[in-house]
Image (spheres, rainbow, N blue to C red):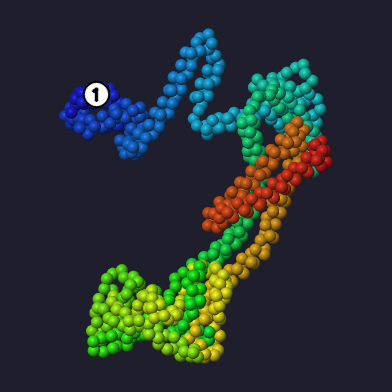
Amino acid sequence: MNTQQVEQMTGISRQNIRYYEKEGLLSPKRDEGNGYRIYSREDVEILKRVKMLRMLGMQLDVIRSVLHGEESLEEAVVRQRERLLEHQKQLKAAADMCEKIRRMGEKDLDVDACLEQMEAMERQGGMFARFRDDYKKAAEWEDKKEFSFYVDANIKTKEEILRSVWEYGQTHGMELQKVHGREEALFLADGQMYRAACLRLRPRERGKEEETKRRALIVCRRCTREKRTGRMRFLQAVHIVLRNIRRQKKRSALQVLVCMAAVCFGMLYQDNIDGSRQQLAELDEIYTVSGEVWNYNGSMNSGLRIAGKYADALRESPYLGEMEEKVDLNAVLLGEQEEVPAQAAGINCLAAGELEPGDVTWEDEGESLDGTWCVMDKTFMEKRGLDLGDQVTAEISGYQEDEMAVVLLTVPLCTVKLEIAGYADLAAEDVLCPLSEARQWFDDGGVEYMPSRMRFEIKDAGKLNAFKKEMDEAGFMEVTAGFGATGIYKGNALVVDDRAYVEAARSIEKNIQFLMAFYPLVLALMMVTGYIVSCLVMQDRRMELAVMRALGTGRRRVFFQIFSEHVLMAAAGCACGALVCLAAGTGSPGAFFRVAGAFLLCYSAGACVSLAVAGRFSVIAALMGKE
């Protein structure tokens, strides 16, 4: 396509097409014979896209970045939409102002008020922009409010003061104009009236000859006062504080470094304490404390007769997690030709039968330890020709101690039918049944149910002492190795495997006790450091305080200005120290607030005391160097 055809298809004039080519938005090919431009359909689509984006008010540099793939179309239109919405707000504000002027009429029109409102609207760019403009205005006013310089001369008269001001003005390029007819040293600077005053300072030594001259401070302060709002006064105070911090760079840097070092030391110490406490709290996740029931002489932990009060105390304990419970049974499988004796047991979980979930081959997946079924030993099943799903009839008997509590006797319970739900390689038993069914068999036979083995885990090892106290109240005994033979089947003793946990806990607790023993000393050292550093830094500013008081600055303003500078630098040092510690992976926000809070409190106390002491000195004596 040629240029005329492209004009018809896009509605863009030839001049604009050439301009877009010049701006690098498209690059059509040229005929090798005559050099005419040849536009492709892709060029036409590019021009249509350029036209669309231009109609949205998008600038050419943005369109160029979109076409060249430097910026996505979505990002460009989102930013353009934000610009249009902002422009829409400005247009609406202008329209509202037009309506306001129309209603006021020419006679009642207040041009100054309208200009002030329109300029305020023009300056609006968000809260930060307004704050920035106000701060610039306050800083400019404060910077022009007064200026001072030192003179190595004995200044006495008004003429000598003005002569010194003129020399200073010529050196710094200031436009000054004298004001006559007054006893005070007055002059105009940039159209504003200033009053100059001289403060005589202590003599200053010069060289080896110890020649002394009177040194004077010339202070020039603007006479006119400005009506200031509370916001403007606050911003001026902020500017003064920041200006003094910049002026005293070395002293400010020293304050920041001292505070940073103190906070880093405190946070590292606090982090050691918190880390040790965290380790103590996480010991129960590292160490598993388990226990089981034994007889009193420590010879048996299975095949026992655990009385109901002991078993109930373990089941009802809130400190225990997983519980393994087992009861030994005697079974006789009844068949058409023979009766087969078998060793049986009731279990509440596979672990109680020394089994893992993958050790059992089930007839149906997802079997639970409820119902009238059993798991048989694989070899036992093969010898009897049994298979999964078969039902067997069994006479179930339990065990009971004789009168002397020396041997166990079998006690008939009931006859039941059991379905073979699974098989496994069992270590000690031929048949395993659900414990819930076994307990029911004891109830049906009128025999007291007593578990033969109980093992458990403690949920929270940190509550180990509370658990031991509870078990002691329940009547459990300690194991006494080799003591007696009577009643060896009674499960009345408790063994808790807590040696590793207790040793680790004691080691950590000793570390915490050691750190806490020196904690008051470390805290006191930090507090004293903050107090002393604040006092020492304040000593170097007595002359500055005296000059401010001599110029008429009130005690309260002097106090808050100097105090704010000190506290601000101390807070900056604390923040830097916290960032260093957090970047190094030590400390925590909680430790920072505790350490920094105590340090800043003492630092502020030192600043207050120093300011109070400095305020008691004579201003004249301080200026003369006698304080």
Q: How many marks?
A: 1
Bin the neighbour count of mark 1 within 10 Å (Cα to Cα): few under 14, some 14-19, many 20 and up. few
Q: In the image, 197: left or right of 376? A: right
Which of the 4 quarters of the picture holds residue 428?
Answer: bottom left
Q: Secondary structure at mark 1?
A: loop
Q: Is residue 531 left or right of residue 129?
A: right
Residue furthest left in the image: 33
**What's the residue type where badge 1 is placed?**
Gly
Q: Which residue is mark 1?
A: 11
Nearest the viewer among 95 and 624 is 95
Q: Residue 506: x percent and y percent?
A: 59, 71
Residue lying at 51% horizontally and 88% vertically, measured from the top left: 487
Residue at image coords 32%, 36% = 73
Residue furthest to the top in view is: 107
Where is the N terminus found, in terms of image quarters?
top left
Tell me if residue 558 comes above or below residue 607 in the rendering: above
Residue 520 location (% of width, % of height): 68, 60
- Residue at left 48%, top 13%? 103
Residue 345 in sight from this viewpoint: yes
Residue occupying the point 82% across, 38% down: 618
Q: Quadrant of the C terminus?
A: top right
Q: Horizontally, is 213 left or right of 363 in the view?
A: right
Residue 540 lies in what quarter of the image? top right
- In front: 4, or 489? 489
Query: Going by the image, does 401 lie left or right of 226?
Result: left
The location of residue 337, given as percent across then percent down, is: 23, 89
Q: Is residue 250 visible?
A: no
Q: Looking at the picture, how far across and down is residue 533, in whole percent?
A: 70, 50
Task: Give whichever of 319, 399 is nearer the camera.
Answer: 399
